[in-house]
Amino acid sequence: MDQIAQKPLIRVRRFWALCAFAIALAFVINAAFGDGTLHEVLIEGQPIAAQIGWGITFGLAISVPSIVVVSFVPLFSSLRRQLLDLVSRLDLDALNPLWISLCAGIGEELLFRGALQPILGIWWASFVFTVAHFRSGQFHSMNWQKLVYATSVFIAGLFLGYVFLEIGLIAAMVTHAVVDVVSLSTARRWLRVSTYA
């Protein structure tokens, strides 16, 4: 972890840029291959308040048990260290976990669920979603912890795809953002504890 921590921090503005790129790419893909507009895809589904409620519920239902398992089950202690290595380069000061999570939730879901899933289907969109996490997940040097992470990203893609189909895109965005903000906030706490330990 020391080697990774010495590299420069990845700032929130990089996530804003990635979010803007994902949104622009979603519009291009949708314009070229989609049946309707992304605005139509965004407003389809259950009422917005219900989608937000479902998104918060799903996000907490996924992130809280996952954090408990990774925190307290000894089998997953090396996975926790691996995940801390992955997030140790992020600037997690102040509200940055929230901003990073909103960027990921909005940008990635608009691209993978809103634009790609209607064209490729849920399985292929989830596969592309997993491949898109290749660099951030450091999948180039695979071990069992990274395989668990890659598998969880794929399963998350399938789940978010199902949420998109059954409830709506906003619910998928909120679910993704809540999982990320809870995970990043917890990781920030773990990093601070390990720094002062």
Image (tube, rainbow, N blue to C red):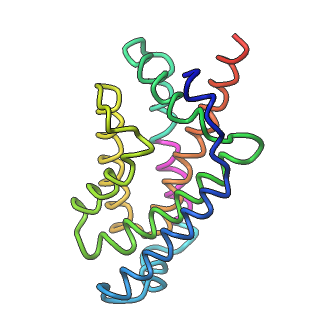
Question: 89 above or below 48?
Answer: above
Q: Residue furthest right?
A: 94
Location of the N terminus (image quadrant): top right
Question: 90 above or below 51?
Answer: above
- Front in this rendered view, residue 2 or 145: 2
Classified by dominant secondary structure, the portion drawn in magenta counts as helix
Q: In the image, is 167 to the left or to the right of 2?
A: left
Residue occupying the point 54% across, 62% down:
18
- Front in this rendered view, residue 59 or 85: 85
Q: Position of residue 110 (x, y in %)?
A: 45, 70
Residue occupying the point 55% across, 29% down:
4
| Total tally of numbered discs in the picture | 0
Location of the C terminus (image quadrant): top right
Q: Position of residue 148 (x, y in %)?
A: 31, 32
Tell whether position 30 is magenta.
Answer: no
Residue occupying the point 52% across, 46% down:
179
Location of residue 132 (image quadrant): bottom left
Residue occupying the point 32% across, 71% down:
116
- Front in this rendered view, residue 166 or 86: 86
Which span is picked out in magenta?
Answer: 51-61
Q: Position of residue 135 (x, y in %)?
A: 41, 45
Tell whether position 55 is magenta.
Answer: yes
Question: 170 above or below 134?
Answer: below
- Front in this rendered view, residue 121 or 69: 121
Q: Position of residue 73 (x, y in %)?
A: 43, 15
Q: In the image, is 73 to the left or to the right of 84?
A: left
